[in-house]
Amino acid sequence: MTQVEIGRGKSGRRGYALDEIGIVPSRRTRDPEEVSISWQIDAYRFDLPVVVSPMDSVVSPKTAIEIGRLGGLAVLDLEGLWTRYEDPSSLLSEVAELRGEAATKRLQEIYSAPISDELIGRRIEEIRSAGVTTAARLSPQRTAQHYKAVIDAGADIFVIRGTTVSAEHVSGRAEPLNLKQFIYELDVPVIVGGCATYTAALHLMRTGAAGVLVGFGGGSGHTTRTVLGVAVPMATAIGDVAAARRDYLDESGGRYVHVIADGGMTSSGDIAKAIACGSDAVMVGSPLARAAEAPGRGHHWGSEAHHGELPRGARVEVGTIGTMAQILHGPSSVADGSMNLMGALRRTMATAGYSDLKEFQRVEVVVAPHPH
């Protein structure tokens, strides 16, 4: 890819965000009802290519069960309120009422309570007992401390998610998590991320991960770009990681690692474009934070918003537009791509002439800057 000169002493690649690309229809169209949007990771098959982000404003044990019944997969944040408090309902109400700068400081205080392994077990068991696939998330920093409680409780899929996760974390202060050894010793599929480059993704794939998260998560409430200066446009990041998946498939003799686009997908068009760029599924937060059932009560925040030393997220007001079923399956009463996300994806695929997600990853795309 062409290097662009930023200054005489620095050049960089031109990256593309999802709203800068467009999907090109082919000569053939299909009936949307005949399009399959199911996907499978390891032994687990899902009707929808939607993984719901481990954020307290979206996923509680109750909403995880509801999303599972609707055909998706929800990931419970094991470093959130549900594993720190017996009943966090009053705290969730309080967070929804916080105003301005006070929100970050109060979030830090609320999330300073210790994580309980007993509560980790109880929350996972609650979701499991409903008969849906159970996924739970820990950060790389806390995985070694709490993973036994996750495995003992019977989680189906283990997610190790941070802003940036590397296979070679270097630290003089603590023994880093050896991802390769850790994943090898576990009996459950592990999804790990985020990453945003070909090389980082290839290293994560070589650890034995079943899936890799592309991007830095957070989306709507994320301030990583402002606080750290770290940013890779999603369309480019997904394309690079999809190339790593293809090359690792050859290198490993046929081992397919799933690519999950994570962050910044606020509309149905973003989801379609993420898959068109090469992702197998998408991780979304804010679209479902707007559901009537969401624990955030019309507000949305991620784990970065309450970091004890350097918060990189904000609690944002997203409002409420309908039920989870309506947001995922319709019918939609708005024209902005915020409802009937899966109906829109089917229609995009049908319009472009593709019958399943794997095929749709080969669709032609063009650079089409969004008119602002």
Image (cartoon, rainbow, N blue to C red):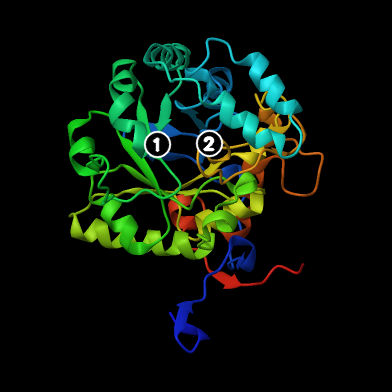
Q: Nearer the viewer, residue 145 or 157?
A: 145
Residue plotted at (44% across, 63% down):
239
Q: Do tag 2 and tag 1 residues touch (Cβ < 8 Å)?
A: yes
Q: Position of residue 134 (x, y in %)?
A: 42, 24
Query: Given the image, on which type of amino acid does mark 2 rest?
Result: Ser
Q: Residues within 10 Å of mark 1 (few under 14, many from 20)?
A: many
Query: Given the image, on which type of amino acid does mark 1 rest?
Result: Ser
Helix, strand or loop at disc 2? helix
Residue plotted at (42% across, 28% down):
135
Specify the label residue 114 is tagged with. Answer: none
Image quadrant holding the N terminus, namely bottom left
CA–CA distance between discs 2 and 1?
10 Å
Question: Which residue does the numbered mark 2 point to in the structure image?
Answer: 303
Residue 245 shown left or right of residue 30 in the figure: left
Question: Which residue does the numbered mark 1 point to in the structure image?
Answer: 139
Residue 164 shown left or right of residue 64 in the figure: left
**Which of pointers 2 and 1 lies earlier in the amino acid sequence?**
1
Q: Residue 41's image quarter? A: top left
